[in-house]
Amino acid sequence: MPDSMRRTKSIELRVLRYRPASDREPAFVSYVVPYSDDMSVLQALQSIKDAQDGSLSFRWSCRMAVCGSCGMMINGEPKLACNTFVRDLAGKAAVIEPLQNFPIERDLVVTVGDFVKKIESIYPYIMPKVAKPIEDGAYLQTPAQMMAYESFSDCINCMLCYAACPQFGANPDFIGPGAMAMLQRYNSDSRDGGRQLRLDQIHGEDGVWACTAVGMCSDVCPKQVDPANAVNQNKTNSALDFFLRAVRPGPRP
Amino acid sequence: MSERRPFHRPQPRYWWAHKPYLAYTLRELTGVAVALYAAILLAGLVCLWRGPQAFDVYRKILASKGSLLVHLVLLAAVLWHVITWFQILPKTMPKLILGGRLVPPRSVTAIALVLAFFCSAGLLVVVIVIGALS
Amino acid sequence: MKHVTINRSAPKRSVAPVFWLLFGAGGMLSALFGPALIILTGLMLPHGWGLPASFADFPHVLGFVRHPLGKLVVLAVIALFFWHGAERMFLTLKDMRAGPLPLLRLLTYGVAALLTLVTIALLLAIEF
């Protein structure tokens, strides 16, 4: 076995546990976990579940930062557990908590229903500008046209941006960075014609205007989606829409 | 299905005073410096309206060491405003594609900072030249 | 090909764009010219550094403010700088949960509006 896989060292993980059937409120539980240099925090949690406490609950799937399931707070920062390595936390006890700003369902599992509703609310699908029957072939797009929305399409819905956003922390109805990234993915797609419908969903106090450009969402994003750009360029769009709505074509707003 | 009782953790009251949000709060406070400077100008306008004696008092206060210190602090705050403003600027713009490549936000910030330097330096040069010629 | 779009009712429109544009204009003006203005009015003119001492005297400043363009410059700088500060202060006070929102709006936007009116009144009182 290569040295990097030998579990020669140990680390203390302080995990915020919460079982609604038996606990009144969350409390920290410490686990000492032997680790190897190549272990992720996700693997450390799995080893706790395997060898120490089978009741520990956490979401995970791909183990390689593409599914967005394992988001949690690691030493106070929103991170993907599969993408964070135990060797980087060594030195003192590492604090593992469920994602900030979300209600806790159980242990490291948070409530995601509202986030899903927000994604659904911004028409997360192409509404073609020009309807084209399948017989006429594919919608064509140049590399430059794809570049305009590509980074926003990289979002894995991991919600780290929501954990980082203090305005979402203050107002859970704020549509938030992730949903705005998805909105911008479609609005900047040359094939799409639903821009106005989506703008109409985010022109309120809980839409883009709850954002104060803290920018932490883009800092924590594991896929460089730059949701701060998605939200803030839509302030410009929303402001233009506010003033120009009297002159834009279409039904009266 | 086991019972659900989602637990709500309230946002810490002083989140804005701690890392990593303190930098953001300090950035926003540079807006206060901009408003304070406007207040100093407005005070001057009031004294101007009141007449030469009142304006002379204003000038004397502006020439004092206290005023010099205040203006240096305001200048430092406004310079921080300039830098952070142009760091935010690219976020309010759609993605720029030039020659088939995405323009990185750092480039927008750099170009804008150069522009700002020339605007302020230009204004100073113009006023100094007018002063020298009169 | 038939299209089915589920039309959701749109949320109530916010009036924030008005204040955001004022904030943006003031922010851009202060970012481009703020340092020069502070150096001019706060450092150079009061001490006569780099400029003739007479530039800061009553007749010269009055001459500038009496000119229509001078009035425009003074109004733009003072008003937009106040509106920029007002928006930032409102949002910061809101972050700090310093008080009920209508009160915070009055203390920030309300004061900015008042001072804008005062500036206009003064500029009109100092004739052309």
Image (cartoon, coloured by chain):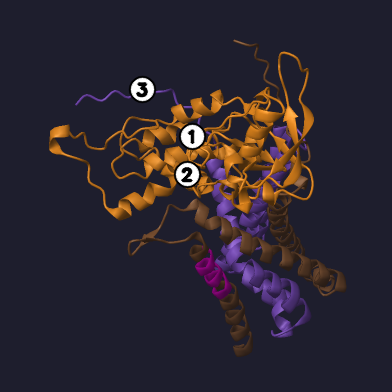
| SS class, disc 3 | loop
Separation (CA) of disc 1 from disc 2:
9 Å
Q: Per the image, is B115 magenta? A: yes
The answer to whether dots 2 and 3 both sit on one chain is no
In which chain is the residue bearing label 3? C
| SS class, disc 2 | helix
At label 3, counting other C-alpha atoms closer than 10 Å, the crowd grade (few under 14, some 14-19, many 20 or more) is: few
Q: Quadrant of the C terminus of chain A?
A: top left
Q: Amino acid at mark 2?
A: Asn
Q: Amino acid at mark 1?
A: Ile
* Lateral position of residue B22 relative to residue B122, left or right: right
Instruction: Residue at 54% x, 40% y: name it.
Output: A177
Q: Return the mark for residue A234.
A: 2
* Lateral position of residue A31 relative to residue B130, left or right: right
In which chain is the residue bearing label 1? A
Instruction: Residue at 53% x, 42% y: name it.
Output: C17
Toward the viewer: B61 or A155?
Answer: A155
Q: Colour of chain B?
A: brown
Question: How many marks are shown on the rendered structure?
Answer: 3
Q: Position of residue C80 (x, y in %)?
A: 61, 55
Q: Position of residue A100 (x, y in %)?
A: 67, 35
Circles 1 and 2: CB distance less than 8 Å? yes
- Residue A52 vertical position relative to residue B123 in the rendered view, above or below: above
- Residue B54 vertical position relative to residue A5 in the rendered view, above or below: below
Q: Return the mark for residue A86.
A: none
Circles 3 and 1: CB distance less than 8 Å? no
Q: Colour of chain C?
A: purple
Looking at this view, name the residue that lies furthest to the right: B65
At label 2, counting other C-alpha atoms closer than 10 Å, the crowd grade (few under 14, some 14-19, many 20 or more) is: many
Separation (CA) of disc 3 from disc 1:
16 Å
The range drawn in magenta is: B109-118
Q: Which residue is mark 3?
A: C6
